[in-house]
Amino acid sequence: MAEPKGNELMDKIVSLCKRRGFIFQSSEIYGGINGFWDYGPLGAELKRNVKELWWRRMTQQRDDIVGLEATIIMHPQIWKASGHVDTFNDPMLDCKTCQGRFRADQIDEIPCPLKPSNSVSQCTGAKTPVRNFNLMFKTNVGPIESADNLAYLRPETAQAIFVQFKNVLETSRQKVPFGIAQVGKAFRNEVTPRNYTFRSREFEQMELEFFIRPDEAVEAIGGIVASGSQPSTLNPQPNWGWEAWHKYWVEARIRFYENIGLPRATLEEYWQKPEELAHYAKACVDILFKFPFGTQELEGIAARSDFDLSQHQRFSGKSMGVFDEELKAAWAKLDETKKTELSQRYFEARFKYLTKMGEPADKAEKQAREDVAGLAKGNYIPHVIEPSAGVDRLILALICNAYAEDQAPDEKGKLESRVVMRFHPRIAPIKVAVFPLLKNRPELLNKAKEVRDLLRPHMTVFYDEAGAIGRRYRRQDEAGTPFGVTIDFDTLGEKPELLNTVTLRDRDSMKQDRIKIDELVPLLLEKIR
Ligand code: ATP
């Protein structure tokens, strides 16, 4: 059977998500609100599983990353320092023909509803001039609406990590290189939310800021800076500079996606060209997913130099630097040529940053010289690698990737088409469904409930006794439940040798195996972990 593609596929996915309770339009009974989405029972479980896995892999299963949970509303100066107040803008224009509002940089991709040509660029001569539109949602803190108590809903989770950097460093006993991870809501007043949940106005991010030594410090300590041409070993080395760490995180993040069921072939790495990079960024890779509506960004992994911490140091007046004992000791042993060379490189980088930020040349030079003197004593502002992923985009990617149509036999063995969500068991909203073969036999129901209660402490279980068994399987196929356990008369000992065994059905192969009830928990746990 031909698999649906593109728009047809998206329509089917959107309809399944609503029908089965993955995703609902926010405020639907009031006509909805553009760019806002709710997750229904299955979607909420799916999202939870993904966030928990990210958190576990990033923090609990590593020694070098710790977590943070910060507020959504923070001091407004943070957004001044980060550049969001001045530059977090999208170019916007209106189409006078259809009255629609569009992002000027996406104009060729967006259909004008009044034009059959499918492109607003056909409304030539009927567009308003481009205006810059700041994407941050504004609010007021306290009862009075005034410029003095203006605040913003955070447009990213990352800045909280930077501003709490020193507190975390001082309380967590971590040393550079180490990371701080956060999962949480972010808000962007997108000009044109679209492609279902892909571009929303309220969404969640999973962000890591991984702090590393500047290359000059790495070189002073280890003699050379490894660019990490083979980070595929995922085995961090002390002589890694920013380039190696950046490649490491690109590979680590792709492996995370593979691990939750997105094959490498569904992803693409897009290495931003030098002219596309933010002025402070040394490199940025977008990990793209092949969505039915096009290949689009799932996550960005940026090498952001020491820009963010430096900005907060300048704006808050508080030091964001660290003291590195190893660097201090190593520097003292360097020969003069090396000292001069590293000092010069560090000076140039700091001077460039400061002048770019508008500091007058004499002041920038003085500051950069102080920074070099600091480096020689073991002090520096850490650089950072930032893998920044959107939870909702990932959920959409997982849903698109899981969606499949195939053929399955009905009660009488006749083939019928089925929709099946092939989620990896690790992220599937429900891990196992428990079915008594017949509803009208209390002994079957009692045994099935016993099995449900046996499994429930270990995983999400769905108990279903209503309707023909084939139909119950089909419902779970659509929910993406990887395993089904059926309690039949053999379970009760009709064939004595099968007493206390059940059938275990695999969602994808539809194969059924006879398993001892006692073996169910370890067997399923192995598959879902
Ligand atoms: P885009 O270019 O698609 O607007 P971006 O490059 O501005 O995205 P970042 O600021 O790098 O995105 O944010 C990091 C991640 O947060 C993105 O890779 C994406 O997964 C997610 N994200 C950003 N904006 C949105 C949004 N409006 N809706 C859902 N997820 C988003």
Image (spheres, rainbow, N blue to C red):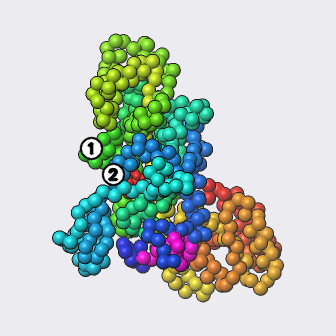
Is any atom of residue 528 visible in this view? yes
Where is residue 491? Give x, y as percent: 77, 73
Q: Nearer the viewer, mark 1 or mark 2?
A: 1
Disc 2 crowd rating (10 Å Cα; few below 14, some 14-19, many 20+) is some
Q: Which amino acid does label 2 sit on?
A: Tyr
Is any atom of residue 478 visible in this view? no
Q: What element carries label 1?
A: helix
Look at the image and give the residue range highlighted in magenta.
11-29
In the image, what residue occupies the spot 32% across and 26% down?
A: 363
Q: Nearer the viewer, residue 261 or 57?
A: 57
Of the 4 image quadrants, the one containing the N terminus is: bottom left
Where is residue 454? Give x, y as percent: 76, 64
User: Which residue in the structure is indicated by mark 2?
Assistant: 270
Q: Nearer the viewer, residue 104 or 315?
A: 315
Q: What residue type is labelled 1?
A: Pro
Where is residue 351? Give x, y as percent: 31, 28
Ligand 1 under 8 Å from disc 1 Cβ: no
Residue 212 drawn in magenta: no
User: Which residue in the structure is indicated by mark 1?
Assistant: 274
